[in-house]
């Protein structure tokens, strides 16, 4: 509502509150939300004998969910407006972002008008070729300013923030992660490295599926409270287990390393350097960023992130990532997932997909969020959507069609 899009409640209910986990969808849709547009605050009451849950929009980092029982005055983050760069040249701004469309992509543009042929329910499709936008479509009332939840695409943003800190010499991902709760004598978790966390190879377990962090996303638990409690199930770097907790722990390690260097973890400042001024990285009540999922961004902002990797860590003549960081995050080292895609360090690999260049890699998120970078073809592809379990996009088919059109 307040991230520059003015999205009405009805559209939020249609897009964000349907197609979610079936065990909570009925309850979520029945809950009444009290929206204070002036204060930019939402209160949700579940039962009369329980205090409402309150979230406040702060303008810089999206919504902050207050602790259970907190009152609005307890919100710690003041409102701050993000910069508006629309009038600046692309890619920092939006001026002259579009390029003449090639014949092949014009043909694909016709296919994009029937995006349902690839499955799912799309809200955006954007293709960048040689640094300029050659294809851009929106559906369902979305436009260039509509920020949508990234889900697990956020994990790739976390990997990028870690990469920036590596370039600055403030963290070594091959060293044990800086997690205070693991430092008791004899705790085997103390040996887990930040790299192993990035590669989903920590060996840690939890009492939920790895992609579920409901206690943090909906239950009011803090990132640290939820993630640091779980024991080892396997020795590190022996088993692949996709886990939100691994990314959250890697982010805690990054925060600790930066604090040791006297620098705060400030995702908003970093993404603003890329012109991603409509990207909101949310944090919990303690100020720890929920970079496993809770990021909101636009299609063009995701394309900017893709361009940073297309350009191998260079941005507007300045190096922001180590020269070998793209290679690092796209190298399948250690245990790998079953299925159609490989995994690097915070990024998925399309290295098993016929008809797609072997160097293609991407950031994938639940409900159909995809950012794919193909360096050898100078292509960046963004697709956002509201898919559900019954109707999902086939990302490989979509990428293959775009590659075929790029002749």
Image (tube, rainbow, N blue to C red):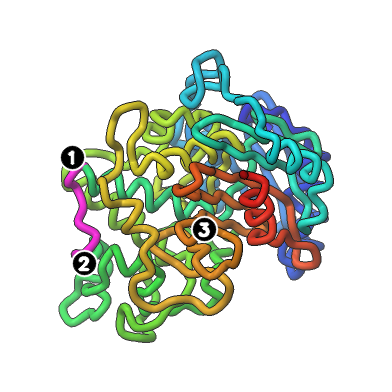
Left or right: where 254 falls relative to 54: left
Q: Earlier in the sequence, mark 1 or mark 2?
A: 2
Query: How far, Cα to Cα, is label 1 from label 2?
Result: 20 Å
Q: Residue at x 79, y 48 (%)?
A: 115
Mark 3 neighbour class, 10 Å CA radius: few under 14, some 14 to 19, many 20 or more: some
Q: Residue at x 50, y 49 (%)?
A: 373
* Residue contact between numbered discs 2 and 3, judged by CB atoms under 8 Å: no
Position in image of residue 156 (x %, y %): 45, 53
Residue beneath label 1, please? 262
Left or right: where 82 falls relative to 33: left
Q: Residue at x 82, y 41 (%)?
A: 113
Query: How far, Cα to Cα, is label 2 from label 3?
Result: 34 Å
What span is colored magenta in the figure? 168-175
SS state under label 2:
loop
Residue beneath label 3, please? 357
- Asked if residue 223 is positioned above or below residue 40 in the image, the reply reads below
SS state under label 3:
loop
Position in image of residue 197 (x %, y %): 35, 67
- Asked if residue 177 is positioned above or below residue 312 in the image, the reply reads below
Viewer-proximal residue among 269 and 31: 269
* Residue contact between numbered discs 1 and 3, judged by CB atoms under 8 Å: no
Viewer-proximal residue among 1 and 176: 176
Position in image of residue 132 (x %, y %): 55, 30
Mark 2 neighbour class, 10 Å CA radius: few under 14, some 14 to 19, many 20 or more: some
Indicate whether residue 173 is drawn in magenta.
Answer: yes
């Amino acid at each position: 509502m307040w991230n520059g899009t003015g999205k009405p409640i009805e559209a939020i209910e249609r897009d964000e509150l349907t197609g979610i986990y079936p065990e909570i969808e009925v309850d979520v849709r029945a809950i009444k939300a009290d929206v204070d547009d002036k204060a930019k605050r939402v209160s949700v009451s579940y039962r009369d004998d329980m205090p409402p849950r309150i979230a406040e929009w702060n303008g810089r980092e999206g919504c902050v969910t207050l602790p259970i029982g907190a009152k609005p005055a307890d919100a710690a983050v003041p409102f701050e407006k993000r910069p508006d760069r629309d009038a600046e040249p692309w890619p920092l701004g939006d001026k002259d972002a579009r390029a003449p469309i090639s014949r092949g992509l014009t043909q694909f543009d016709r296919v994009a008008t029937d995006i349902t042929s690839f499955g799912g329910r799309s809200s955006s499709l954007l293709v960048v070729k040689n640094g300029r936008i050659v294809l851009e479509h929106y559906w369902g009332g979305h436009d260039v300013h509509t920020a949508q939840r990234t889900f697990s695409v956020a994990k790739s943003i976390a990997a990028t923030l870690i990469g920036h800190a590596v370039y600055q010499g403030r963290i070594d991902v091959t060293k044990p992660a800086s997690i205070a709760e693991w430092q008791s004598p004899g705790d085997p978790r103390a040996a887990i490295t930040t790299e192993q966390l990035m590669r989903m190879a920590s060996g840690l377990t939890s009492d939920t599926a790895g992609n579920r962090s409901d206690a943090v996303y909906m239950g009011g638990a803090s990132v640290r409270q939820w993630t640091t409690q779980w024991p080892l199930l396997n020795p590190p770097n022996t088993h692949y287990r996709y886990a939100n907790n691994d990314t959250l722990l890697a982010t805690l390690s990054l925060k600790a390393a930066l604090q040791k260097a006297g620098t705060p973890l400030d995702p908003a400042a970093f993404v603003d350097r890329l012109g991603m001024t409509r990207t909101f990285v949310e944090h919990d009540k303690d100020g720890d960023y929920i970079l496993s999922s809770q990021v909101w961004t636009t299609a063009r902002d995701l394309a900017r992130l893709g361009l940073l990797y297309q350009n191998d860590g260079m941005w507007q003549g300045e190096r922001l990532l180590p020269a070998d960081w793209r290679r690092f995050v796209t190298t399948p080292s250690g245990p790998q997932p079953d299925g159609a895609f490989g995994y690097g360090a915070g990024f998925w690999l399309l290295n098993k997909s016929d008809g797609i260049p072997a160097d293609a890699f991407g950031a994938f998120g639940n409900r159909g969020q995809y950012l794919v970078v193909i360096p050898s073809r100078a292509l960046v592809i963004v697709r956002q959507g509201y898919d559900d379990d019954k109707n999902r996009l086939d990302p490989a088919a979509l990428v293959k069609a775009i590659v075929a059109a790029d002749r």
